[in-house]
Amino acid sequence: QVQLVESGGGSVQAGDSLRLSCTASGRTSPIYRMAWFRQTPGKERECVGDTRWSDTWSGGSTYYPDSVKGRFAISRDNAKNTVYLQMNSLKPEDTAIYYCASTSSYGRDCYGPDFRSWGQGTQVTVSS
């Protein structure tokens, strides 16, 4: 079982930046894919980035939906079992609870059911 813990959420002004962290513990091997999702009340869960890698595939690849492309960036530190979500030029519509998720399987980008483990979420509030 993998446990995921997000941190770094908070309240910021529009245009500010924020970096979220997601640290995995427990049975972290193998994890080859992690993603960030967000959700606001009354709206469907939205993926904001999906990154994948392998033991033999250096670098990896990351998918971003158009809504955040160019503003959000995912990076990872495998030695720390941590994935980061750097969010720049934040907008009020980015306000949501942000969740990280992990899986050992490859599949369609940002396909929620692929992910077996989920964090508890961290609140991000962007005011205008």
Image: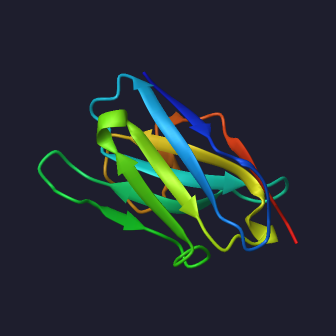
Spot occupied by residue 47 in the image (x, y as percentages of width and height): 57, 60
Residue 87 image position (x, y, % from top left): 60, 64
Q: Position of residue 75 (x, y in %)?
A: 40, 56
Total count of labels: 0
Identify the coloring. Answer: rainbow
Horizontal arrangement in the rendering, residue 81 relative to residue 23 (left or right): left
The answer to whether 19 is drawn above or below residue 109 in the figure is: above
Residue drawn at x 70%, y 47% as measured from the top left: 9
In the displayed orientation, state which residue is furthest to the left: 56
Q: In this view, does 55 lie to the left or right of 43?
A: left
Report whether 89 appears left or right of 104.
right
Say which quarter of the image contains residue 103. Answer: top left
For the point 59% across and 73% down, which residue is it? 68
| Residue at horizontal 51 percent and vertical 40 percent from the top | 22
Q: Tell which of 109 and 26 is nearer to you.
A: 26
As drawn, the residue found furthest toward the right would be 128
x and y, in percent, of residue 88 in the image: 61, 69
Task: State whether residue 50 is above or below residue 32.
Answer: below
Q: Quadrant of the C terminus?
A: bottom right
Work out which quarter of the rendered image holds the N terminus and state it. top left
At horizontal 65% and vertical 34% (from top left) the residue drawn is 120
Q: Is residue 37 above or below residue 105?
A: below
**Residue situated in front as seen by the camera: 15 or 40:** 15
| 115 or 31, nearer to the observer | 31
